[in-house]
Image (spheres, rainbow, N blue to C red):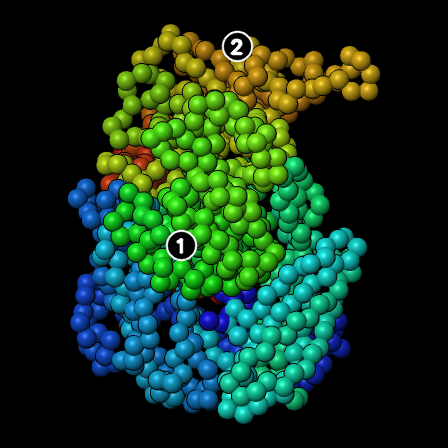
């Protein structure tokens, strides 16, 4: 296994030209550039080429015995591009074998085939096919030759194709994917080759797959040390005397330092180079300044460059301490985290990168700085985004070890003994160079935590983690740190084996609902602790049935009841007060499919729904995790028939006070204070802000307001000045469709997407909060509709249809570019509403 999918491990003609044009780098890379320029002059391919293998596949849903044969007739099969998830294309069925775990969607068996030609010039090269993830039980053939099986659907893997390729002739890849053994996951997994594929071509003398390990053993703003371990493979049948030049390039592409080492490598052998490189006045990576460097590894055979390999990295120091919690570059940072699942609503598990970028933008706007990849390895590009956008990642490997969870019949436990080490090695080797990854998680709520041999299993996993990456600590999300009989507690030796003890729902049992971590803090003062999973402020977006008892919709999981929200507030007060708690990851940042009970098809635990629309809980976290003044009011103010009834109006704000007005009349000024202002300087000095109105120690403000149509307005003040306002008004009937796109242009690459939000508005352009109008979509030009959604967990409309009913005033269309530049016209219509259209430019 050889190369880091998170890197840019190939050199193209454009890369060579750009490098040769950089004057600052010429001196340090002159030997390589001389060869590179010679390659360009003679039109010789670069030494390492990594091409996308995503396009031009054939697909069949169902089994097809004999489809591995090169001459198998597949002309009638469907044309698909990867990533591809066939489950999300199906209909919801209460009796589906996937059950609520898999969102009641179909699974089964599917086949993929692709033909390609290998250039004659690559006859003597090493050719490997990379899969970023296939769910699950994939089997792969090249020209009828069986390459292997991979059960785990979340781990990246690759196969060498070289011995069975026909240079200059036709080659056929066949992949059988078997997701028929249900249930095998506690949430929606998707089915198929749902992540990217790559064809990697290298010379026989090359850097190994995932062959660089970059660490920063010394970090300071004045001077840091970067250690680079590089595994070089000599696949020739003769010895090689090679030179490895390792350069460190800053974000502008300038070479800031380099090292050169030489070594004779025997035929068919490997050698690991270890180089330490000092960097003066480095730009340290952090959430506020996610500055990245590139480690460029150049392998030369004499004067000829035979491999060039880029590794993205950041210079940073991440520490977990028993007393101070989490420190990044010596600075205390609270991990304001969310747990996520890897699918993205209407596109299932085949998620375009832009969709994750948009979701991370929303989480950053909320003030989130940390992500837990619950409960499996994610796609490589997700971690790339976290590196670039400055998120701290708890990177999780497994949901099961040796012991099964009751929710699944065919979970990972049946593969664990045979496959866990190989799966873990791929996971660690691919992700260990990401500066965003600050903590490994070996598992989530594994029953092994209270099994007699559980501590030994943990020790074996820890050994692999620490051997392959000695720089990061390991945790497990433990939901049985403490419980009451007949439930079992996690064994003391298991908890003692964790570098950082992860607490899932620390406040579940007895007095821990008030004391949280303090009991274990007194008993185990040297224990490093983190909240790996805690209840969040989810709920069905726009559903305020909790205001009126006994009106909750059937199957709804309304997580937004105020009593539960108070629990979230109290836990956050504790976590934010005590430094020794490294942080907390609430469940969840975004709604997800699966883990549901019919008629719901997914969980509404998120503070953002499956469309990316914000819920009220979003603004609670924003009020606690951000500094820019904000106020948010809810519920909506359309309560026809409730005139005179008291409606509880809630405000989330980070202002000192908020005053509520109804139709211009003040309903009162309120304010909360957390943390309290203690005296400073001299006796009695509490500062000017302490004199602001203080009406509650909760982290929200409420007024009971007799309903009358009109406008509610909240005015937030800081330091006695108006800092933020928000209005909500009673609207008229639904009259219009209003389209809002998250961007005005796309890249014409068959991958890029635009999110088009549909707002149902009244005649004055105000969102009608309970509108459920059906909306039809029409796409013209160089785009295609790949998903529709509305965020309703109980909706059974198909994600791949050309229409969608609005839910509480909103729905969404996802439109993807084609390979051709041009315009994309998106039209939305409904029988009783004024339609709307917008134009998106797709650029080459």
Q: Helix or strand or loop: what does disc 2 sit on? A: strand
Q: Identify residue for label 2.
A: 667
Q: CA distance from mark 1 to mark 2?
A: 46 Å
Q: Residue furthest right?
A: 682
| Rendering quarter of residue 602 | top left
Q: Is residue 420 above or below residue 33?
A: above
Residue at the (42%, 43%) spot, across then down: 449
Q: Helix or strand or loop: what does disc 1 sit on? A: loop
Left or right of 107: which side holds 189? right
Q: Residue furthest top?
A: 644
Q: Identify residue for label 1.
A: 351
Viewer-proximal residue among 152 and 54 = 152
Give the image location of residue 473, x and y in percent.
Answer: 57, 50
For marks 1 and 2, the one nearer the N-term is 1
Decide: few, some or many residues near mark 2? Use Cα within 10 Å; few <14, some 14-19, many ≥20: some
Q: Is residue 577 above or below residue 328?
A: above
Decide: few, some or many residues near mark 1? Use Cα within 10 Å; few <14, some 14-19, many ≥20: many
Left or right of 31: which side holds 85? left
Q: Is residue 249 above or below residue 288?
A: below
Viewer-proximal residue among 834 and 26 = 26
Q: Is residue 407 above or below residue 773?
A: below
Residue at the (69%, 71%) spot, across then down: 275
Q: Are marks 1 and 2 in contact (CB under 8 Å)?
A: no
Count numbered badges in the picture: 2
Q: Residue furthest bottom?
A: 238
Give the image location of residue 39, x and y in percent.
Answer: 59, 86
Left or right of 685: which side holds 744? left
């Amino acid at each position: 296994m050889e190369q880091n999918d998170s890197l840019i491990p190939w050199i193209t003609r454009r890369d060579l030209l750009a490098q040769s044009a950089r004057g600052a780098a010429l001196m340090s890379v002159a030997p390589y550039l001389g060869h590179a320029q010679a390659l360009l002059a003679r039109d010789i391919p670069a030494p390492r080429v990594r091409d996308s293998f995503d396009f031009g596949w054939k697909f069949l849903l169902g089994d097809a015995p004999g489809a591995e044969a090169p001459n198998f007739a597949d002309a009638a099969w469907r044309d698909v591009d990867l990533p591809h998830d066939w489950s999300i294309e199906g209909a919801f069925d209460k009796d589906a074998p996937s059950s609520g775990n898999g969102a009641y969607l179909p699974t089964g068996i599917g086949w993929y085939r692709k033909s390609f030609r290998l250039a004659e010039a690559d006859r003597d090269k090493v050719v490997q096919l990379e899969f970023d993830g296939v769910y699950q039980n994939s089997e792969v053939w090249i020209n009828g030759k069986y390459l292997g099986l991979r059960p785990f659907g979340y781990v990246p893997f690759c196969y060498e194709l070289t011995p069975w390729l026909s240079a200059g002739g036709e080659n056929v890849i066949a992949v059988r994917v078997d997701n028929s053994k249900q249930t095998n996951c506690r949430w929606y997994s998707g089915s198929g080759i749902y992540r990217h594929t790559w064809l990697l071509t290298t010379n026989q003398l090359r850097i190994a797959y995932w062959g660089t390990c970059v660490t920063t053993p010394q970090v300071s703003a004045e001077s840091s040390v970067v250690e680079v371990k590089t595994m070089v493979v000599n696949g020739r049948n003769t010895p090689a005397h090679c030179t490895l030049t390792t350069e460190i390039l800053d974000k502008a592409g300038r070479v800031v330092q380099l090292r050169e080492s030489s070594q004779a490598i025997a035929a068919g052998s490997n050698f690991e180079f270890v180089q330490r490189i000092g960097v003066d006045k480095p730009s340290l990576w952090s959430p506020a300044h996610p500055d990245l460097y590139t480690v460029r590894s150049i392998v030369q055979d004499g004067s000829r460059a035979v491999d060039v390999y880029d590794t993205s990295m950041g210079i940073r120091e991440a520490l977990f301490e028993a007393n101070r919690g989490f420190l990044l570059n010596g600075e205390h940072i609270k991990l304001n985290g969310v747990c996520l699942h890897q699918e993205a609503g209407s596109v299932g598990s085949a998620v375009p990168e832009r969709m994750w970028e948009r979701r991370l933008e929303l989480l950053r706007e909320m003030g989130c700085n940390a992500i837990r990849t619950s409960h499996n390895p994610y796609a490589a590009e997700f971690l790339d985004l976290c590196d670039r956008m400055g998120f701290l990642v708890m990177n999780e490997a497994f949901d099961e070890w040796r012991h099964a969870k009751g929710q699944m019949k065919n979970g990972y436990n049946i593969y664990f003994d045979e496959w866990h080490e190989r799966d873990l090695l791929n996971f660690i080797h691919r992700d260990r160079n990401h500066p965003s990854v600050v903590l490994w998680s070996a598992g989530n709520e594994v029953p092994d935590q209270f099994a007699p041999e559980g501590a030994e299993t943990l020790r074996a996993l820890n050994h692999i983690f620490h051997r392959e990456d000695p720089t990061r600590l390991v945790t497990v999300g433990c939901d049985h740190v403490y419980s009451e009989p007949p439930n079992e507690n996690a064994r003391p030796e298991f908890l003692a084996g964790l570098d950082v003890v992860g607490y899932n729902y620390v406040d579940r049992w007895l007095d821990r609902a008030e004391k949280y971590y303090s009991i274990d803090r007194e008993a185990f003062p040297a224990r490093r602790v983190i909240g790996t999973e805690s209840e969040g402020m989810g709920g069905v977006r726009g559903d305020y049935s909790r205001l009126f008892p006994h009106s909750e919709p059937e199957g709804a999981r309304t997580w937004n009841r105020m009593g539960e929200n108070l629990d979230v507030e109290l836990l956050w007060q504790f976590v934010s007060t005590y430094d020794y708690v490294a942080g907390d990851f609430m469940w969840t940042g975004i709604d997800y499919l699966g883990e549901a009970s019919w008629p719901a098809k997914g969980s509404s635990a998120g503070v953002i729904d499956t469309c990316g629309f914000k819920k009220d809980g979003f603004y609670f976290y924003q009020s606690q995790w951000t500094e820019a003044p904000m106020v948010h009011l809810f519920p909506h103010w359309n309560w026809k028939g409730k005139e005179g009834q008291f409606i509880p109006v809630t405000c989330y704000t980070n202002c000192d006070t908020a005053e509520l007005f109804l139709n211009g009349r003040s309903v009162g000024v309120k304010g909360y204070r957390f943390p309290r202002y203690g005296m400073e300087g001299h006796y009695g000095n509490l500062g000017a802000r302490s004199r602001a109105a203080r009406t509650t120690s909760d982290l929200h403000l409420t007024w009971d307001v007799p309903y009358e149509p009109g406008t509610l307005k909240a005015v937030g003040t800081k330091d006695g000045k108006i800092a933020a306002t928000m209005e909500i008004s009673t609207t008229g009937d639904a009259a219009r469709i209003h389209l809002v796109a998250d961007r005005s242009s796309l890249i014409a690459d068959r991958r890029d997407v635009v999110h088009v939000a549909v707002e149902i508005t009244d005649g004055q352009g105000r969102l009608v909060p309970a509108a459920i109008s059906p909306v039809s979509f029409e796409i013209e030009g160089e785009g295609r509709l790949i998903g529709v959604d509305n965020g309703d967990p109980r909706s059974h409309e198909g994600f791949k249809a050309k229409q969608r009913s609005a839910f509480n005033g909103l729905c969404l269309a996802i439109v993807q570019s084609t390979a051709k530049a041009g315009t994309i016209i998106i039209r939305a219509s409904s029988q009783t509403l004024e339609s709307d259209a917008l134009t998106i430019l797709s650029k080459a």
